[in-house]
């Protein structure tokens, strides 16, 4: 008899807790929509998908504006391999994006110097 009462209390408590969680979640969504948090989150996602800034790329690879393309490639290879061994896909992708950013800049510079 006691086990049956205990089971009923657990079931009823779980149902009440579940309903409260759903109601709190709905209220949190409504509050976020009112305060503009949802809009801000969308803006952050859009900003995150943009191309990396040159200064950030240089900082990630540890190179200066005076570094040659060969130096950048050496730094890239070294950092990429280190992160491949340690298993950090996030860092590996940041290193790759940094190289892509600088490669685009160096290609534009080399085209600009050959045109004149």
Image: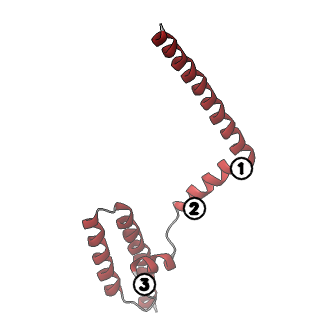
Asked whether the beta carbons under mark 3 and mark 2 sit within 8 Å of each other, the answer is: no
Residue at 75%, 44% in the rendered image: 34
Q: Is residue 109 above or below residue 9?
A: below
Q: Between marks 1 and 2, how big is the CA–CA gap?
A: 17 Å
In space, the residues marked 3 and 2 are separated at their CA atoms by 29 Å
Is residue 37 placed above or below 27 in the rendered structure? Answer: below
Find residue 75 and report its horizontal and vertical position in percent.
Answer: 32, 81
Going 52% across and 74% down the picture, which residue do you hit?
A: 53
Displayed quadrant of residue 66 = bottom left
Q: Residue shown at 48%/15% (left/top)?
A: 7
- In screen coordinates, is 46 left or right of 39? left
Front: mark 1 or 2: 1
Residue 12, image x, y percentages = 57, 17
Left or right? Give the position of 66 relative to 80: right
Reply above or below: 114 against 48.
Answer: below
Task: Indicate which disc residue 14 carries.
Answer: none
Q: Which residue is mark 2?
A: 47
Dot 1 or dot 2, earlier in sequence: 1
Whole-percent x, y for residue 70 in the image: 31, 86
């Amino acid at each position: 008899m006691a086990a049956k009462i205990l089971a009923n209390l657990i079931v009823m408590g779980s149902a009440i807790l579940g309903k409260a969680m759903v109601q709190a979640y709905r209220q949190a969504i409504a509050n976020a929509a009112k305060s503009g948090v949802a809009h801000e989150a969308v803006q952050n996602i859009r900003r995150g998908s943009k191309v990396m800034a040159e200064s950030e790329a240089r900082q990630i690879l540890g190179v200066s504006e005076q570094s040659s393309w060969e130096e950048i490639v050496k730094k890239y290879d070294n950092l990429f391999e280190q992160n491949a061994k340690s298993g950090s896909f996030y860092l590996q992708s940041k290193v790759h994006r940094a190289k892509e950013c600088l490669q685009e800049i160096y290609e534009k510079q080399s085209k600009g110097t050959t045109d004149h």
